[in-house]
Image (spheres, rainbow, N blue to C red):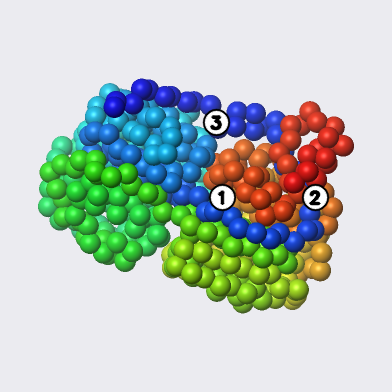
């Protein structure tokens, strides 16, 4: 069946600008949560479908605003989709080769169309993503890798315009192990003529998942999960015979585990993969939590009092920057002083100032934060600044005494599927309310969990 076009340009929760979260905190959370599919695997996999003309079926794709943005972008390119599980995508035809500014400004990951469009279509235009709340985030390494494969680029009116003939295999040495940079180059190299090697490649599990998906399309790739990825180019790719299941979201998993740690609760996350979360589980153990795992589940019991720790964010398998904000909340309620070094992004402490409003004691200097643990935090109105900072504020609200109000929650819709429902399922008193509700209506919504 050929999917009918389904183009959406509105965010999944179109009223999200006017909504806020109300949390009545200080209650231990108990129960089981099912992990969703990984946002950061689903996005490159959706873009990679462009490489193989035909109908693709993908399962375990999380329902997120960023997935909507990706499907909308693919729709504009000429590849309609049908929502459901599996999601169906028809990439038979490429009618257009641009990711315009209004899409890219909503989702930086739109840059992931560059590699697939060049490899299949020979031309791609992507509005330059620019910086975002957490850092400058250049894409020079993406372009360097694609140039090595034979593409040429011009910058015209804020838009990167790439062109190429048949791409040719090359040795590419990345300056740093960039996640989406590795993905863009990998997606282009699979259709290049000859063998490519990506040295200093990023090793994140989401890249391994993308690589596995590409292999189901007929790509020849070795070294996934290592720093040297070898790609033997093939002339063409075709959709796999079976639906492809996106890997679990390790950051969502880790966020729920922190909720158990912070509330002195006991949460088991199912349909996940502990091997993707070793650094996070080690840190939660160091903080005094009891961690038990099976191949697909992780259970964390929070201690009476958390312990302080030292943390440095690093590329995988080091501690993920996407869990730094959440662990800062853990540190804020730990016994003693913790230090946190953010080594990936230059401006990823925006949550610290909001946590101060809730009674945390945190000093930041450059990429270092010193967190003096307190025995309690108190609910207050706070403002979310980016996706993971928003998650940290939710965690702080769950742990704090009293009521927390979180504004600008549209960030959460980009990366956490059904967050409120999942938290209510483990006993959280949390509600998503419109700014128009009066105080008693808001409280009764939060208390009715
Ligand atoms: N960098 C460059 N030049 C490049 C590419 C990256 O200087 O060409 C720098 C960045 O500025 C940064 C560092 O290298 O300082 C690493 O950035 P990376 O490219 O690895 O990040 P990304 O690919 O843009 C992905 C995730 C982020 C996650 C980072 C780090 C996706 C769609 N995004 O971003 O996820 O924080 O890797 O693990 O996969 C999130 O989900 O909240 C999120 C921000």
Mark closest to the chain's N terminus, 3 or 2:
3
Residue assigned mark 1: 134
Q: Check the picture and name the quadrant holding the N terminus.
A: top left
Is there CB contact under 8 Å for labels 3 and 1?
A: no
- Taking the spot 49% from the left edge, 26% from the top edge, the residue there is 9
Residue 410 in the image, given as x and y percentages of width and height: 62, 38
Tell me residue 312's x, y (percent): 55, 69
362 relative to 379, above or below: below
Where does label 2 land, which residue?
A: 24
Does any portion of residue 341 appear in the rendered image? no
Q: CA distance from mark 3 to mark 2?
A: 27 Å
- Ligand 1 is within 8 Å of the C-beta of the residue at disc 1: yes
Tell me: residue 51, above or below residue 401: above
Along the line of sight, which residue is nearer the eye, 351 or 270? 270
Q: Residue at x 17, y 47 (%)?
A: 192
Q: Nearer the viewer, residue 49 or 17?
A: 49
Mark 3 = which residue? 11
Instruction: Please tell me whether mark 1 sits on a helix, a strand or a loop.
Output: loop
| Residue at (84, 53) in percent of width and height | 402
């Amino acid at each position: 069946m050929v999917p009918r076009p389904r183009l959406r340009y509105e965010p999944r929760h179109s009223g999200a600008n006017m909504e806020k979260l109300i949390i009545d905190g200080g209650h231990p959370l108990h129960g089981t949560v099912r992990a969703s599919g990984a946002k950061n695997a689903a996005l490159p996999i959706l873009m990679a479908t462009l490489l193989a003309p035909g109908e693709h079926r993908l399962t375990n794709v999380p329902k997120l605003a960023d997935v909507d943005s990706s499907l909308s972008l693919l729709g504009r390119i000429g590849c309609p989709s049908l929502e459901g599980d599996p999601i169906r995508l028809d990439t038979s035809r490429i009618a257009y080769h641009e990711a315009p500014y209004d899409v890219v400004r909503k989702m930086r990951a739109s840059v992931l169309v560059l590699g697939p469009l060049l490899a299949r279509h020979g031309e791609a235009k992507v509005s330059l993503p620019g910086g975002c709340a957490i850092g400058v985030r250049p894409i020079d390494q993406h372009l360097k890798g694609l140039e090595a494969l034979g593409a040429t680029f011009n910058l015209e009116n804020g838009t990167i315009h790439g062109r190429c003939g048949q791409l040719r295999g090359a040795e590419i040495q990345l300056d740093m192990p960039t996640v989406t940079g590795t993905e863009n180059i990998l997606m282009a190299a699979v259709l290049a003529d000859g063998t490519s090697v990506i040295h200093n490649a990023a090793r994140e599990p989401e890249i391994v998942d993308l690589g596995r998906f590409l292999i189901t399309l007929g790509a020849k790739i070795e070294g996934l999960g290592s720093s040297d990825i070898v790609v033997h180019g093939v002339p063409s790719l075709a959709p796999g015979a079976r639906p492809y299941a996106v890997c679990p979201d390790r950051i969502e998993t880790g966020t729920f585990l922190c909720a158990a740690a912070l509330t002195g609760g006991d949460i088991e996350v199912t349909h996940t993969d502990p091997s993707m979360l070793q650094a996070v589980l080690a840190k939660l153990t160091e903080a005094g939590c009891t961690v038990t795992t099976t191949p697909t589940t992780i259970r964390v019991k929070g201690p009476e009092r958390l312990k302080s720790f030292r943390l440095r964010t690093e590329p995988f398998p080091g501690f993920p920057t996407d869990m730094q904000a959440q662990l800062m909340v853990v540190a804020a309620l730990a016994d003693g002083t913790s230090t946190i070094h953010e080594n990936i992004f230059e401006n990823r402490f925006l949550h610290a100032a909001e946590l101060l409003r809730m009674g945390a004691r945190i000093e930041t200097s450059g990429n270092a934060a010193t967190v003096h643990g307190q025995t309690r935090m108190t609910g207050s109105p706070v403002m979310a600044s980016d996706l993971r900072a928003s998650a940290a504020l939710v965690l702080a609200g769950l742990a704090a005494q009293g009521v927390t109000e979180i504004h600008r929650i549209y960030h959460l819709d980009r990366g956490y599927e059904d967050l409120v429902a999942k938290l209510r399922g483990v006993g959280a008193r949390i509600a998503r309310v419109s700014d128009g509700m009066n105080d008693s209506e808001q409280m009764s919504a939060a208390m009715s969990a």
